Amino acid sequence: MMSVRYVSGHSVIVVLCAVILCGALVVAIDEQSLTGDGAYHLLAGLQALETGSNTVNLEHPPLAKVIMATPVLGLADRSPVHFRGDTMQDAIGRLHDEPDVMRAATRRARWAMVVVFVIPLLVTCWWLGRLFDADGVVLALLFLGTFSVLPNLVILQTDAAVTLGFVLVVTVAIVWLRRPSFVLAALLGAAFGLAMAVKYSGLLLASTIFLALVLARLSWRRRLLHAGVIGGCTLMVLMASYGVANHRYDRDAGRDSLRLYTESRSTLVVGEEMRPWSDELLAVESWSPALAQYLTGLIGIRIQNDVGIYPSYAFGEISFDGRWWYFPALFVVKTPLVMLVALLVVAIGSRRVIVETRPDRHVREWLLVGVTVAIYGVMALLSSYNLGIRHLMPIVPFLYLPIVVALRERRRTATVVIVLLTLEAVALAPLWMSATNTWWLGNANPTRLSFSLGNLAYKQNFIQLDHVATERDIENLAVIYPLLDRRVLGAYLPEATLITPRDPLPAGWYAVSVLMEQYLPALARQDEALPLDRWGDDWQPHWEVLSTDAEDHGLVAGSFRLLYLPDQR
C-alpha cells in the first residue's frame, strides 16, 4: 500500500509540474518580444510563400521559416514582405509599424513552431529516455524546465527545430541499430533531412549517421542498401522543403539573390571572400536552384564565421573572433544549479551509470550519443558565433540523459529535481532569457552582466519594460538602446522616446540597455582597434552624463537600467 501511494504521489507531482511548465511555455509565447532574427525568419518565410521564390535569408534553410509563416498568411491587408535581400531592415520596420498585426503574427507563428517542432521534440525526448530503460517523462521535463531552454523553444528561431532533428536522428538511429529495417532506415533519413532542412548545423549529424552504419550488425551489402535508403530519404525531405519555398520560382529574382550574397550586399557579411563562388553558384542554379541556394547559405555562413562579424561580450571583454571557452563558460552560467550538481554527481559515478547499466545493450548507444555531442561541441568551440545558449540546445537533451538514467531507481530524487526546476521557471517568468543561475542573489548576482546579445539583450524585454513604466507611472520614458529601430520600440512602447547620440538628454526617466554599461567600458579598456570604436565614441558622452549625474533605480525588465536624470546638473 505504501508503494502504491508513493508512485501515485510521484505521478501527481510530475503531472502538476508538467502542466505548470506548459503554462510557462504559453507565457513565453505571449510575453517575449519579437527578436531581430525572429523577424528575419518570419518575413523570409512569408516572402517564400507569397512570391514562390526563396531569395532572402539564405543563411538558413527554409523549412522552419515556412512553417512559422504559414499561419500568418493573409493576416494583414498590406503585406510588408515585398522586398529584396538588401532591404530586410525596412521590411522589419514596416512589420512593426502595425503593432497589432505584428503581435498577432508573432503569436500565430510561435504556436505553429510549438505544434510542429516543440511538442514532437518533447515526445522524442521521452522516447530517447525510454530507450535507455529510464523515465522518458523525466528527460522531457528536465529539458523543458531548464530556464535558459524554455524561452528559446518559442522564439522564432531555428534552434528548437534543429534540436528536434538531433534528438530524432539519434533516437531513431538507436532503434535502427537494435533492429535494422528499411522502414527505420527511411525514417532515419527523413529525420536527417529534417535537421538539414532547418539549419546548417544539422549537417553535423552526418557523423552520427556514418557511425550508426559502422556499428550496425549487417553485411556490407545490406549496409550499403540501408545507406542508400537513408541518403535518398534525406535528399527527398531536404529538396521538398526547398520545393515548397520555390513553388513559383522566378529565375531572374533567384539569380539576383545569389549575386547579392556573393557580393556581400545581402543579409550575410562576407566581404570579398564569396565573389569567387559567384560563377559556380550561378552554374549550379541553372540545373538546381534548391542546391544553389543551399550551397550559397552554407558557404556564406562558413565565410562569415571565418571573418567574425559579431561583437561578443563576455566577462568584460569584446571579441569578434570567438573564444574556445565561451560555450563551456556560458553553459556553467546559464544551466540551473540543480542540473550542474546532478551532472557533477553523475560524472563522478559515470562508470556505474553507463558501463554497468546493461553493457551488452547500451555500449553502442552511448557511443552514438557521445560522438554526436563531441562533434557538435568541438564545432561550437571553434565557432565565432558566440551568440547565446540557444546554440547549445541541440545537445542539452544528451547531456541530461545520464542524469535521467542515474535517477531511474530514485523517483523521489527525480521528483525533487523536477519540482526545483519548475519553481525556478515560475520565479523567473517571463525573464528567463536574461537570467543566470545565480539570479536568487538579487543585486549581488555576480553573473547577471557576464554575457550579452542572445543571453541578455536580444531585442528582448520591451513588453516587460512597458509593464514597469505603467506600474511606476512613468509617462515620458526615454529609452537608450544602440542600433534599435524607432519603429521596433514604438510597437511596444508607443509613448516612449528613443534617444540617439545626437539627441540632448533632458531631465526625466531613462531606460538604458545594459549594452551601454557592458560595451562602453570594455571598449575603453581594450588597446586594439575594433569595428565598434566609432559606436563607442558616439555614445560615450551620453553614458558619462547618465552614469555620473543620474539616480540609479536598478535593473528592470531583465536588461534595462532605470535612471532618473534630475533638472539640476
Image: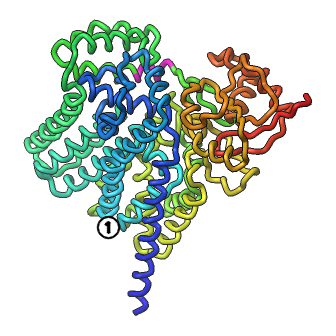
**Residue located 43% across and 11% down the image:** 265
The reply to whether the magenta stretch includes residue 302 is: yes
Instruction: Identify the element where label 1 is drawn.
Output: loop
> x and y percent of residue 27 in the render?
49, 53
Could you tell me which quadrant the N terminus lies in?
bottom left
* Residue type at tag 1: Asp
Instruction: Identify the magenta region.
Output: 301-307
| Chief secondary structure of the magenta portion | helix
The residue where tag 1 is placed is 133
Magenta highlight on residue 308: no
> Depth check: 530 or 440 in front?
440
Q: Which residue is drawn at 41% across and 74% down?
A: 409
Identify the residue at horizontal 83%, vertical 33% (top origin). 565
Front residue of 263 and 206:
263
| Residue toward you, 180 or 91 | 91
Q: As rendered, which of 486 and 461 lies closer to the eye?
A: 486
Q: Where is residue 65 in the image (x, y as percent from the top left)?
A: 33, 34
- The answer to whether residue 70 of the structure is visible from this angle is yes
